[in-house]
Image: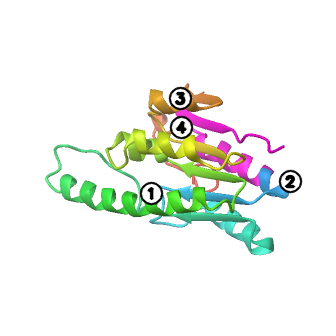
Amino acid sequence: MTEKGLVLINTGTGKGKTTAALGTAVRAWGDGQRVLILQFIKGAWKYGELKAIETLGSIDGRIEIRPMGDGFVFHNKKDPDNEERLQEKKELARKAWDMVKKEVMSDNWDLVVLDEVNYAIHFGMLDTAEVADLIRNRPEKLNMILTGRYAPQELIDLADTVTEMTLVKHAFQKGIRARRGIEF
């Protein structure tokens, strides 16, 4: 009998959504599972977790990370170039979504992490119904983790576990810039 895969969502305004998902991904890899991490927004620069996962993947090929975006989404309606940039990001997200569907349905993975997919939905790059449909129709044993602020209620309702990270205090509020190895 195949165990039914779980759907986890890490959402909220606090830090740690991606970090928690990557911790679970490394745990799954350590237990012999095949893991794919698809990142919807990240992609413009190198950061610590990317290097770590790539190193683990070079050991046996059972864990892979694919940054598919071009950096953060800045949703500034006063910026006249914003609409053009948002269109470019939507095109990237659509290409990424095609890859996600193919990989999820391939039955090649035990865990698929859709990092920052909730942002892609929130900013209109992806449709909630499409994501929900993929979750419902995924291979039975596939575990999935979705991260990012603004998790839609429809996805929360489908999930088995939802964790909301809450911002209590952040160094940035005191003017302390992001630190390599801590923030990225």
Are the residues flagged by discs 3 and 4 in contact, CB closer than 8 Å?
Answer: no
Element type at marker 1?
Answer: helix
Q: Is residue 137 placed above or below 60 in the rendered structure?
A: above
On residue 97, the disc is 1
Are the residues flagged by discs 1 and 3 in contact, CB closer than 8 Å?
Answer: no
Q: Residue at x 84, y 56 (%)?
A: 30
Query: In which image quadrant can residue 33 be found?
Result: bottom right
Residues rendered magenta in the picture? 1-27
Q: Earlier in the sequence, mark 2 or mark 4?
A: 2
Q: Nearer the viewer, residue 155 or 15?
A: 155
Q: Which amino acid type corresponds to the residue marked 3 in the rendered image?
A: Ile
Q: Which amino acid type corresponds to the residue marked 1 in the rendered image?
A: Trp
* Distance CA(mark 1)–CA(mark 3): 19 Å
> Which residue is denoted by mark 2 in the rendering?
31
Q: Which amino acid type corresponds to the residue marked 4 in the rendered image?
A: Ala
Q: Is residue 23 magenta?
A: yes
* Distance CA(mark 2)–CA(mark 1): 28 Å
Element type at marker 3?
Answer: helix
> Which residue is denoted by mark 4 in the rendering?
171
Which quadrant is the C terminus positioned in? Answer: bottom right
Element type at marker 2?
Answer: loop
Q: Is residue 81 placed above or below 16 in the rendered structure?
A: below
On residue 156, the disc is 3
Query: Which numbered mark, 1 or 4, is in the foreground of this view?
Result: 1
